[in-house]
Amino acid sequence: MTRIPLLAWVTAGAALAALLVPLAAQAFDPFLVTPDAATVERSPAYRHANMSGDAAIAELQSRGLMFQREGAVRGVQTPIRLTGRLHGVYVHTALPDAQRVTTPFEICDARFALALDDFAEILAKHDIDELIHYSMYRPGAPPAPVRRIVPPGALPSSQPLPPLPAPEGDAEGLAPLPTQPAGAAPHGPVARVTQARPVRPRGSSPEPAARPTPPGSASPQGSASPPEPAARPAAAPSRHPAGMAIDVAKVHKRGGDWLDVGAHFAGHIGARTCGAEAAVPTDDKARELRALVCESADARVFTYVLTPNYNFPHRDHFHMEIKAGARWFLYH
């Protein structure tokens, strides 16, 4: 009997694994989209994610965006902090202004700031002037979030999620918002904060958004996971530790209404969010929240977006991310 060398078996196994990964990925999420190479490379998400830091800074300057460079930030290629509105949209966490100018959660990579500016252009078309997020950069984020999926209608307190690992360093003493369900685990180190000004009770009259005063000059420089989606069958770290993602909690319309992802999205785990086969909600706020996601999908602003339709840990936010090297898109 002919004996096949061990190296040949290993080589053949590696080749087979390479062929099986795309198949497993396709089965991992049915909403994965893999356009042709030319379409991918023309997309804003691909172009921004694969930029050099210097090129991203130059484009931020050419767009006239207000930002300041940050010193070295672990894991972030070109860290910046936004100091002005994007297309008239005020993007911030729910922290008080005094903490916002120093918190790491408002740092992002210059490349992601370009994607965020593109998304803000979509928001502005919907008459949105404010976006509150849980975090962009997240130091010491866990390698993957809790993956347990709770059936729709189940109360978080009936099947409590295991707590996430504690973040490195001080998490600034952030407390849950009063609207957080009892027994629900906080989302990452930034959790939800009790601040009456930026997180106004639903139904209350809107207040003008206060602008923070960043340390030093606020002028522009010269005028920088969730489970891995369908690219791999296993989970991988989110891009929050690289400043390449944002968790959008709610947006404010100039007329005074808040569109709150947790309260108004009205999703169903496993359901399609965008496309002709997606269910159309009857509620106006739910429809508009979907429009924000789906218009960004049409424009290919992000590599992938995970909504409450993805799983229970995303029940109250949109995870929006760009990913260098990815040649696929996923909006779920």
Image (cartoon, rainbow, N blue to C red):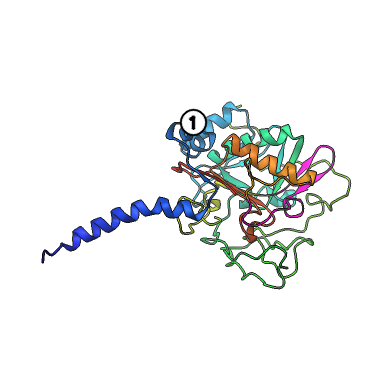
Percent from the top left, x then y, of residue 218?
67, 36
**Of all residues shown, which one is farthest toward the left?**
1
Q: Which residues are magenta?
A: 249-271
Percent from the top left, x then y, of residue 48?
51, 36
Residue at image location 81% in from the left, 50% down from the top: 197
Q: Is residue 34 magenta?
A: no
Label 1: state its secondary structure: helix
Q: From what the image shows, is residue 183 above or below residue 205?
A: below
Compared across the picture, whether 238 is left or right of 23 comes to right
Q: Is residue 258 magenta?
A: yes
Q: Which residue is mark 1?
A: 42
Where, quadrant-wise, is the N terminus in this rendering? bottom left
| Residue 278 seen in this snapshot | yes
Nearest the eye: 42 or 196: 42
| Residue 85 seen in this snapshot | no
**Residue 11 figure quarter:** bottom left
**Residues packed near mark 1 inside 10 Å, few (<14), some (14 to 19) or many (20 plus):** few
Q: How many marks?
A: 1
Nearest the eye: 20 or 37: 20
Percent from the top left, x then y, of residue 58?
52, 30
Percent from the top left, x then y, of residue 236?
48, 57
Compared across the picture, whether 25 is left or right of 290 comes to left
Q: From what the image shows, is residue 36 above or below residue 152?
A: above
Q: From what the image shows, is residue 172 above or below residue 282?
A: below
Three-letter code, disc 1 = Arg
Q: From what the image shows, is residue 258 above or below residue 119?
A: below
Residue at image location 68% in from the left, 57% down from the top: 315
